[in-house]
Image: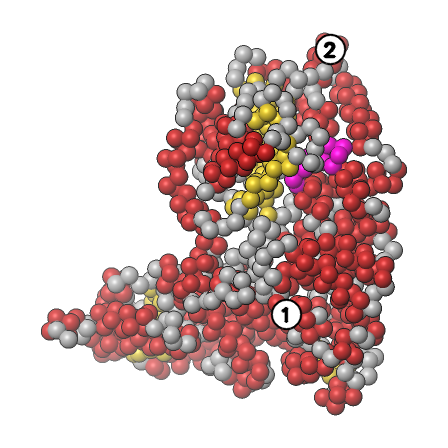
Amino acid sequence: MSLKESIDTDLPAEALVARRRELLASVGSTPARDFLKAHSAAVDEYFLSSFARSTVGPRLGAMRTPCALIALGGYGRAEQCVHSDIDLLFLFENKVPPEAEALVREIVYPLWDIGLEVGHATRSVKECIQLAKMDMEVLTSVLDGRFICGMSPLYHQLMARMRDKLLTANPAALISRLVENNKERHMRFGDGAFLLEPNLKEGQGGLRDYHTILWIARIMANVKQSRDLEYFGFLSHDEYQCLNQSLDFVWSVRNQLHLLLGRKLDQLHLEHQTPLAEAMGMQGVNGHLPVEQLLGELHGHMEFIKQCYSVFIYELDQRKRLKRKNKSLKETQVPGLKFNRGMLNFSSPEALLNDPLLMAQIFVESAVHKAPLSAEARRLMREFNDVVGQEWFQRSPDVADAFEKVMARPSVRFNALDAMLDTGFLVQYIPEFKTLVNRIQFDQYHLYPVARHLLLTVGLLVQIGTERNEDGRDPLGQRIYQEIRNRRVLLWAALLHDIGKTEPTGGHSERGAPMAERIGKEKGLTEAEVDTLVFLIREHLLLFETATRRDINDEETALSIARRVVRPERLKMLYLLSLADAMATGPKAWNDWTASLMRSLFLKTLNVMEKGELVSRRATRTIEEKKERMVESVTTAEERAVIVDLMKYMSPRYLLYTSSFEIPQHIALYRQLQNRRFVWRIDPSADGRTRTVTLCAKDRPGLLSRVAGVLTLNGIDILDVRIFTWRNNVALDIFEVNPPPDLIFEEERWQRAARHLEAALRDEMDLSAELTQKQDGFRSIKALTADRPQKVLIDNKSSSFFTIIEVVAWNFPGLLYRITDAIFRCRLDIWVAKSATRVDQVVDVFYVRSFDGEKVDAPEDVALIRKTIEGVLQ
């Protein structure tokens, strides 16, 4: 070591820099908990050394204003992650002296100089107590407090007074506030064990759930260390060991994420997941990607933390109830089972040995009473799970009956199927689930744990059919559910619809059908039920994909569905399964627009099957009724004449698709058009989150691509588009978009977009060149989508009059412009456009004809179209 290095590392801040460098180099090879402790100890050493060197600190004692340095929060728990804030309290006995500011400068400023984030406070003991009374965040940070240096009696005085004044005065109220705060946090950040981009700290199943357990234990039993959770009986030995394993993994991910970004971040965004998996040394196995392994393990560990917290809070609630009632609130009539503090348990291990069917019956009781299994019951389930895999148990009608009762009783609030999965019962009972547990699959539809999605689908299916209509949900689903004669097979279909995702490639629907057939036969379904089950698994994407990718007002669409489904009962089952599946996928797959498309397609197809009535007949009646209402809505003969004249130009598709409320608005826009190239109106949605852009323009080839390019150029993301052409060569295009980034200057942005569109329609702007300049801002998007599969499908069979182009691609700004511009360069007119987004992929569908009005079916033309579009996706 050189003389300079020796001198530098004698300084506390430089010594900390050197020690952190050593520690950060060991992040991948050191157990996470060991790193956190060593990192915290390194920061401790800095404060000890700095305080000893301080010119102010020693004088404070002489001035009878003693001071103590207290570590707070994660640093106080000795859980200091790579770039987490260092929270510090300068504690004084009475009034904070003026010299405290100089002490802060001596100790904190050097940490800022070396780039560390330090949150500090200078308070007296009394001020700490007063603030902790009012602010739960202050209370919890002090609960985690740890003495570093200075006058230790001050620290003990603070903790003693806080326990006396706050913790023992009304512990129930404090615990209640903590639990409520956690509920609100879960609502804000969502379920980390389920979401695509989990928040490692604040999400459900994140580190904050563990912190809350610790804080409550500190209030109740003055717990000092996390290991005391086992000593004081808050967690069993197995639970504590498993919790430690899960925490270690989440901490490892968090540390590597901090290292990867060079800063603090707890949200695991999509663009960081692949490089993070590589940094953690994840290996893809059996065709699965390393990132799938990372997310699968992470979801599993966050799920355990979530379950640990849920059982902990449930047990607390039961203790409180038992104190009031002085007896068990719930009872079971099943011999061999019992309730203990509100949770289900086996009466003894011997009872389970004598009657293994209790392993299925305990879940039925759990579903009926909405009561969780105790930690002991879960332990016994794991120990005896090999029994579930035995052939007699697999084929037992009693077990199948119990299993179906559990499937029929879930709710969003409590689902006993979750406990089946967590205890390993489900994996043993249906071995195909083994590869689906925490299975994350990157494809055009899903990016989350497949097994959890299947359980959620079952729960939502039952909710659609049995619970009261909430959140404006269409009651049609409930009515159809009640009409289904055999709900048993529908529930099995919901549970097994993605069972074919055991392999990472290929069509999971086709692969899953024979797997479902084997399972159905084994579990006692009749031959007819198995046949229906296989059909539902094989076709479970049919309605959703048709509704979002085809023109549902084309008569051929409903007829093709009817021919494929054959029976109305199957169509109803398929509709309910499709609803639950899409809802379980999340808001990117399920929204009001998608719901209306699905409902419309279902009703059209059902009408064809039940009444033999062609779509066109009903559509004609609907159009005529709409025309009559529009004519009757105006008061003067002159206005009536104008509307009647204009309706001659409106296509049947336009009149059918467009509401009676929108058509007068479009007529008003048309009247404004006159000799202009275009006019538009911008309307905010009811919740203000999106905008509807209604454009009226003289139609011309390439119009859609120009509008899409201008919107992209101005930072306006297109969510959906509907295009119509009147017979007088007037285009009406309706875009659902996100508003411009800066809402304060939104009006100016729309005015600029209008100027750009005017220039583009005059051929005075090279949109491709302008957008290419903007591509630098999309580099992170390009990196994110570079290696992802994309498809261009050209269909000349589904429509008699149009060639259908279907593009599946990872979404990025400007995608719609690129595709529509490529279609224009292929000398094609777009007559119908549909856009559907699931997860981060978009499916854009276009009904096109050549400029001569013909379908494009020559092999060389089809190949050119595919090559041109694929070229703009790279």
Q: In this view, does 141 lie to the left or right of 610?
A: left
Q: Taking 169 as reference, is 208 above or below it?
A: above
Check residue 641 in the rendering and tell me which mark sits there, or answer none. Answer: 2
Q: Is residue 735 left or right of residue 46?
A: right
Q: Which of 93 and 142 is in front in this view?
A: 142
Q: Is 22 in the magenta?
A: no
Q: Which of marks 1 and 2 is nearer the N terminus?
A: 1
Residue 663 position in % (x across, y down): 68, 24
Q: In this view, does 1 lie to the left or right of 87?
A: left
Check residue 434 in the rendering and tell me which mark sits there, or answer none. Answer: 1
The amino acid type, in three-letter code, at marker 1 is Lys
The amino acid type, in three-letter code, at marker 2 is Ala
Q: Nearer the viewer, residue 126 or 717?
A: 717
Magenta range is 548-557
> Is residue 697 among the parts visible in the rendering?
no
Give the foreground label among 1 and 2: 1
Q: Residue at x 43, y 78 (%)?
A: 159
Q: Residue at x 44, y 25 (%)?
A: 756
**Contact? badges 1 and 2 (CB < 8 Å):** no
Q: Residue at x 69, y 74 (%)?
A: 428
Res. 191 image quadrant:
bottom right
